[in-house]
Image (cartoon, helix red, strand yellow):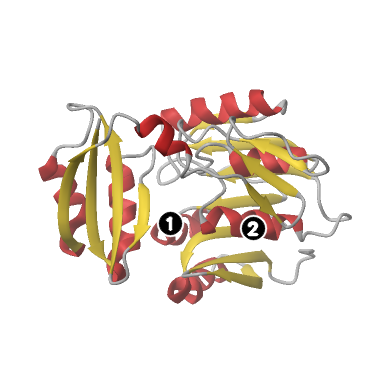
Amino acid sequence: MIRLAVRVRRADAELALADLLDLVPAGVEEIDLGDTIEYAVYGAPGELPDLPDLRAAAGGALVEVTTSAVPDDWGERWKRFHRPLLVGGRIYVRPPWEDVRPGVIDVVIDPGQAFGTGAHATTRLVLELLLEIEPRAAGGPLVDLGTGSGVLAVAAAKLGYTPVVAVDHDPASVVAAGENAAANGVVLDVGRIDLRREAIPTAPTVLANLVSPLLIEIAPRLADPLPRRLIVSGVLVHEGDIVAAAFAARGLVELSRRELGEWTALVLAPRGGAGLL
């Protein structure tokens, strides 16, 4: 197996990531190296993106492209990168090889299938905010935009939301979300959609863990009725105000904001509406 890594300037990392995910929609490994961010993909020779395409996707942010062979024991070493995560004292996100933890909501996610295991700050922020919604305001229909592995949709279903619609542009994510739903004993309406070109599904509660450029692009295209609450993540701290302004122009104002490291997530609700936390 080969590891193909692209290092980009921190200031341009999110824009580069958006383009890289068009090339590698199943997701990339992200490593913070200080002044640069490294995005890496793994695969057999012939399965990885062509180097010219990778360099073009990284664009002017590119610092370095490297390739390396993965050791034969990678299968076991890889498991050490995916540890269980307890969120808010209530949701326990774990890979299949970890034991169930009593007394909490168990969410088992296969990290080998698609992007999103709950460990990344952007996903954790959404889970934390979802847990803070008042019980009287929780439940009902929910849409997860850019579901990846389905971790947010599965957690929402286990919190009592129904029906839960989970959509993604990547076919592998659609399959993975369906399989993870089955593994967790929940029902998701999983489908493939191109958020840039197709109608955006809506519900009283919408989760959107997407990169900022895509969030800004879809904001004016949200259909009526607007969600009572919209939780957006995948936003770098310095881009929070820009993303909030894009949704404010559509009539969704910021209720709260939470940061974790260099990432932030926002809770939005209709202006003058009854969005509840």
Q: In the image shown, does 57 or 254 lie closer to the viewer?
A: 57
Q: Which residue is mark 1?
A: 211
Identify whether 41 is placed above or below 211.
above
Asked whether, in this view, residue 227 is left or right of residue 1, the answer is right
Query: How far from the left and from the top, in percent, is residue 127?
Result: 66, 53
Q: Is residue 226 visible?
A: no
Q: Quadrant of the N terminus?
A: top left
Q: Amino acid at mark 2?
A: Leu
Q: Which residue is mark 2?
A: 230
Q: In the image shown, does 13 or 192 lie closer to the viewer?
A: 13
Asked whether, in this view, residue 216 is left or right of residue 105, the answer is left
Identify whether 97 is placed above or below 130.
above
Separation of marks 1 and 2 at Cα, in angstroms? 15 Å
Looking at the image, which residue is at 76% across and 61% down? 132
Q: Decide which of tag 1 and tag 2 comes sooner along the chain.
A: 1
Mark 1 neighbour class, 10 Å CA radius: few under 14, some 14 to 19, many 20 or more: many
Q: Quadrant of residue 266?
A: bottom right
Helix, strand or loop at mark 2: strand
Asked whether, in this view, residue 98 is left or right of residue 78, the answer is right
Query: How far from the left and from the top, in percent, is residue 200?
Result: 53, 44
Q: In the image shown, does 238 or 112 lie closer to the viewer?
A: 112
Helix, strand or loop at mark 1: loop
Q: Quadrant of the C terminus?
A: bottom right
Q: Amino acid at mark 1?
A: Val
Query: How far from the left and from the top, in percent, is residue 274?
Result: 80, 65
Mark 2 neighbour class, 10 Å CA radius: few under 14, some 14 to 19, many 20 or more: many
